[in-house]
Image (cartoon, helix red, strand yellow):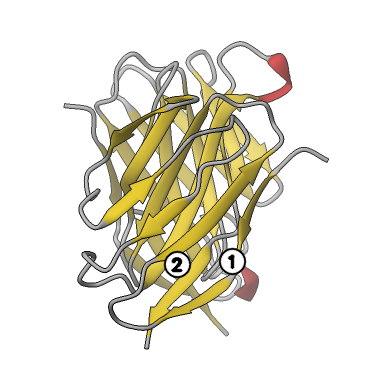
Amino acid sequence: DGGITQSPKYLFRKEGQNVTLSCEQNLNHDAMYWYRQDPGQGLRLIYYSQIVNDFQKGDIAEGYSVSREKKESFPLTVTSAQKNPTAFYLCASMGVRDRVPGHTEAFFGQGTRLTVV
Amino acid sequence: KNQVEQSPQSLIILEGKNCTLQCNYTVSPFSNLRWYKQDTGRGPVSLTIMTFSENTKSNGRYTATLDADTKQSSLHITASQLSDSASYICVVYTFNKFYFGSGTKLNVKP
């Protein structure tokens, strides 16, 4: 089955450490996205990539970095510069479901909950 | 500016009651609009899709409406169940981007 997979589901980080969240998709989608969600809040865009080897900052990119070396993979690194990294992180890819024009859809992973200890 | 606004921000209803969630948008050009259900700690799951020519669409106890002229959509939940407790997110798509509302947090109480 095609889908988008995030790992790990839970991640604990010590202050001052960098950690990398994995996002893999086998949907052959060009566009991939990373979002952050804080308790009771909406989704905020961190980074997005429309094509391999290219990515753009979203609304809250400071303290994060990404790479897009392969179409299938869009890992997110939370660096020590991110002062408040405890949050729920969602990865998404965008494509057209069932080849139906106008049925553009974002496909979401199950998320990674990052906690700073 | 492309924006999606949802109301109310949160809602508490008793099990078995109906409720309606609202979504207003200014996104252009419009491709489609989806309502998602997000359980706590999970990724959003699509409930309905509305394209420009569709006014209403049902998925079980969920019924979505779309008025493309006024750029408004609603999600009506009938005979609510405890499992309906979640955040409901309105997402509006252009042909290569999508825009999220901040969601309505629904709490169904027994």
Nearest the camera: B90 or A8? A8
Query: x, y percentage for residue A41?
Result: 31, 63
Q: Position of residue B87 (x, y in %)?
A: 46, 61
Image position of A106 (left or right of B13): right
- Marking on residue A47: none
- Residue B28, x across and y down, in percent: 29, 17
Which quarter of the figure has residue B99? top left
Q: Earlier in the sequence, mark 1 or mark 2?
A: 1
Under circle 2, the secondary element is: strand
Q: Quadrant of the N terminus of chain A?
A: top right
| Residue at the disc numbered 1 | B84
Residue type (three-letter) at the residue carrying disc 1 = Asp
Instruction: State whether residue A7 is above or below residue B14.
Output: above
Q: Is residue B19 above or below residue B24?
A: below
Q: Of the residues shown, which amino acid type is indicated by label 2?
A: Leu
- Residue of label 2: B106
Does A103 appear above or below B34?
A: above
Residue A100 location, quadrant? top right
Circles 1, 2 touching at the beta carbon (< 8 Å):
yes
